[in-house]
Amino acid sequence: MINLKSNSEIERMREAGKIVRDTLLLMETLVKPGVTTKELDRAAYKYITSCKATPSFLNYNGYPASICASIDEEVVHGIPSGRRIEEGQIVSIDVGACIGGFHGDAARTFAAGRVSPLKEKLMKVTEQSFFKGIEQFKEGNRLGDISAAVQQYAEANGFSVVRALVGHGIGRKMHEDPAVPNYGMPGRGLRLEKGLVLAIEPMINAGTYEVAQLEDGWTIVTEDDMPSAHYENTVALTENGLEILTL
């Protein structure tokens, strides 16, 4: 069931989105060689709760942290730990916050110091594939138009799109219908209409799109150990058109 949001509900989601955005801006200042992912998690928890919000991920289906911190070949759902970030790594940080009964969700991939040209390109293409996707997020279009635009841009740049994980609707629950794949055919799927709020999140790999799950039951890694990047925003279709709530 698709839960279209009223203007007042989207207004409340703006508040959650702002907290997520600012948490990620904080993370950007902290991601550097020598820092542990647990330190990032503690800083995110402190900031989100200082805003009178709740970290959406903490205890979600048993997840033990406030952020996901995924390094290099880790695609998503990396659990923060005492692992220290190293020079040349890329770190994908996924953040959710809930306030007033509504969630916001976004992710960014950050470079720790100087990274390889391949990783630099991967990060840029992943971010740009999101923006190619949301060009299609307008009334009357289909969900597949977003998915196809993401896929076409990523693959045209020599990268692959993760198939096993998708974006999602968001609102009172962090994960709502519809599922939002980052691949597909234009002209297919749900018709887009005012009040639809989605978490659109390209997960782009430098090598194969195949992934595997680690024994921790959470961390998803690339099958070939090539790096992966993640870029996500919560996006609403309002009476004034597209609005990115987490940017």
Image: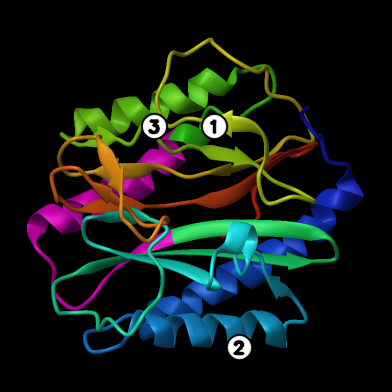
Q: Quadrant of residue 109?
A: bottom left
Identify the mark nearer the N-term, 2 or 3. Answer: 2
Q: Residue at x 67, y 62 (%)?
A: 17
Side of 86 where 24 appears, left or right:
right
On the rendered image, what quadrant is the N terminus found in? Answer: top right
Q: What are the residue bounds of the magenta stretch? A: 108-132
In the picture of the structure, the residue carrying the numbered disc 2 is 46
Q: Quadrant of residue 163?
A: top left
Give, as a three-letter code, the residue at label 3: Val
Q: Residues within 10 Å of mark 2 (few under 14, many from 20)?
A: some
Give, as a three-letter code, the residue at label 1: Val
- In terms of secondary structure, what is the magenta stretch mainly? helix
Callout in the foreground (2, 3)? 2
Give, as a three-letter code, the residue at label 2: Lys
Side of 245 where 123 appears, left or right:
left
Q: Residue at x 80, y 36 (%)?
A: 239
In the picture of the structure, the residue carrying the numbered disc 1 is 180
Q: Which mark is residue 150?
A: 3
